[in-house]
Image (spheres, rainbow, N blue to C red):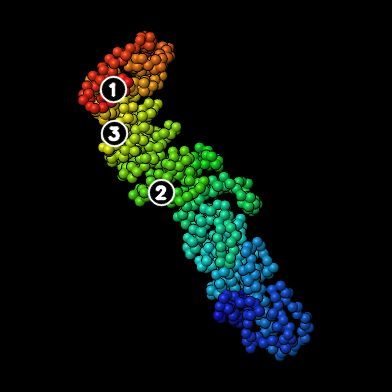
Amino acid sequence: MTEVLAAQNSHGWAPSPLRFSFSSAGVLPAHEIKFPVTEMEKRPPRVPKLAWVEEEEEGPGAAPAQETEKVVPFHPPQEDAALDHKQEQESTRGRFRRAAQLVCKFIRSIRQEETISRGTGLRDYSEVLKHESSAALLDLLVERGVFRPEQVPAMVRYIHQWLTANDSAEHRLDNTLLHLTKVQPNDAVMTLLRVAPSCDRAAMAMWKTIMCSPRTAELVQLILLDVLGSWPEYSTCTSDGDKTGVFALAATVVMWKILQEPCVPHNVKLHFPHLFVHLLFQVFFSTEQMPKKVLTFWKGCQEQHGLATSPNRFAVRTLRSLLCFLQCEHVVMSMECKRGWDTLLCADTHHYAVGLLARELRQSSIDFCPGIAFYLLRLLSKEMPYWDLPALAFLVEVLECLDLRECSDDVLEIMSKNLQHECRERRRLALRGLTVLSKDPSMAKGMWSLTENLVELLEENDSNVVRMTIVLLRYLFLHNRAPIPSPIALQLAEALLPLFDNDDSLVQLCSMSVFQNMLELLMEEGRKALKSPVRQSLLPLSFHCHDENQRVAEASRETLHSSARFLKRRDIEQMLQVDQTWRFGEGLLAEDRSRAAEHLRRALPYLQSPQEPLREAAVRFMGMAGQSLRGQQGELQLISEALEEVTNDSSPAIRNMAIETGFVIRAIQRAPYSTFRRLRDQFRSAWKRWPRLCSPTFLCCWIPEEA
């Protein structure tokens, strides 16, 4: 391919046109370039042809041939015109020879750069780099498209070297750099990060050019974001086959320098969510792990820019600069007052600081939160080892900024995954996120699928986790009246029973409400399997009918009424109707004396209750249980010992009741228990269950005791 390059006097070129020959593969070697000679450019007779050719074919390192000093003879005035014409020809030919030598050296330097994977400084072509014409040559080569894609990295390295050698020509090669970046953006960005990772003066001039131009800004910013999000380095292969990794911290240095400029590119604000998240990512990983090669690179950056800080603190500084650029100085100051930046630099407390930063950003700059939340949602949908916890902490704080109509399924999937995670903190954050989602009634149907996972969390030792879980379950039962399968109902009932005695009154109220709703929504085929846990709920519910908290007492009566109706115990329902809960223990023991020992052990903890009414109800139940346990010396002895401890109770009424009940129990222990009395007690118990005497199971329950 042949291109005609017009010589320009401003660049020091010969005034006559130069014709360069290029192969279809790219720039030809220097010895293949042909320079045609015009009539005015014929060799003078005093310069031997061999010397002229040798001078033309000299390599880039050869010095120009020294011309012999000539003695100019005196010419008469009539010969001046001819002499001036000859001198002009000699001057033209000298400029042409110098331009030809420069072209040869320039092209050879470009070809040599193609074989260098990473430029580190100036080569043996300093006279080429300092010559203005070399920039013009590169301009024309790029403008005419006379280069191969694999030559782009070499040309970018050459531009950096040219700018390094020419301090006052920062914008001389802007158009060339922009064209190369537009054609091969990945090659241009990766090469610049490799050749000047610490971002020197020349590199910064190049970054400003490509970051501020509408032609290349978007492409360059996206590539930088990819590098920022890859710790410790970003691996890619450029067109020249270079696979050298690029440090993520090098891209952070570039962004820090860009944010210090008076006119920050608009696309930085456009991609703020991604940039913000990746800087947080770097703060964490530069705190958690710092490879040796990154530390070596960072020492060079410190020397280059006079930095006296660690890599993680530098990432925080860049993050603060980004927030200040977006006029979020109040967020920066608030984090400073609450020592949030220092907390961010500790691996153990990093996620707490991320949550604090999210709250501050939500309260004062809520417009930025939806973009960050959507990006975090996309990241959490993938596996993010080590950084899932901080990402989840931020997402939970800004969930209310999301449009759940677009991403409800993704949010629920992430929360479900974290509910089952072995990390307790992630389970707690997932519950917090679901609590936020529960404020939207449209989420109830989707959250119903999480019931089984929530039931498992009721067995946690963390009171906060239990409280959030039971509140969520209450919300689900109130807003979703779907039938409950028997296995889940049985697991839920067993988990709810201990919560009736929880120290947190809200947990008590919610657990009783969920238990009551569960009985109403239970499938018909699962009612038989649930009878046992419902029977176990009767005694604690009857005790809490005397609770000092009136809301808990009322909830206990309502739940007890539902349990009695579920078990078809009309005697209990009648007691509740006439408010005779103090007789409840008597009816419970009379219904089935075989479970008296079981009820006794369930009632013993209430003797130590901090509430006086509950301790009083427990002492009263001990007396009733003693009557039913006549002849069972082991159980009677257990009651006597328990009542003995209550005789030191702070309440005089309870002390007296415990003393009297203990006296009765000891009397029962001493009294003989004949076979006749046992038969009589069994008959009385059966008589009270008269409606069921006709059942064939009556004899099956009664005869084994006789045997």
Place residue 287 in its image quadrant: top right
Classify 190 as above or below 231.
below
Judged left or right of residue 382, residue 256 is: right
Q: Amino acid at mark 2?
A: Pro
In primary-sequence order, the first of circles 2 and 3 is 2
Q: Are marks 3 and 1 in contact (CB under 8 Å)?
A: no
Q: Are marks 1 and 2 in contact (CB under 8 Å)?
A: no
Residue 397 in view of the camera = no
Q: In the rendered image, which residue does mark 2 sit on?
A: 370
> Mark 3 or mark 1: which comes first in sequence?
3
Compute the Cα span from label 2 to label 3.
49 Å
- Type of amino acid under label 3: Lys
Say which of 275 and 475 sits in front: 475
Name which quarter of the figure residue 234 lies in.
Answer: bottom right
Foreground label between 2 and 3: 3
The N terminus, quarter of image? bottom right
> Which residue is labeled 1 in the image?
702
Q: Identify the disc placed on residue 528.
A: 3
Q: What residue do we see at 58% from left, 78% from top? A: 22
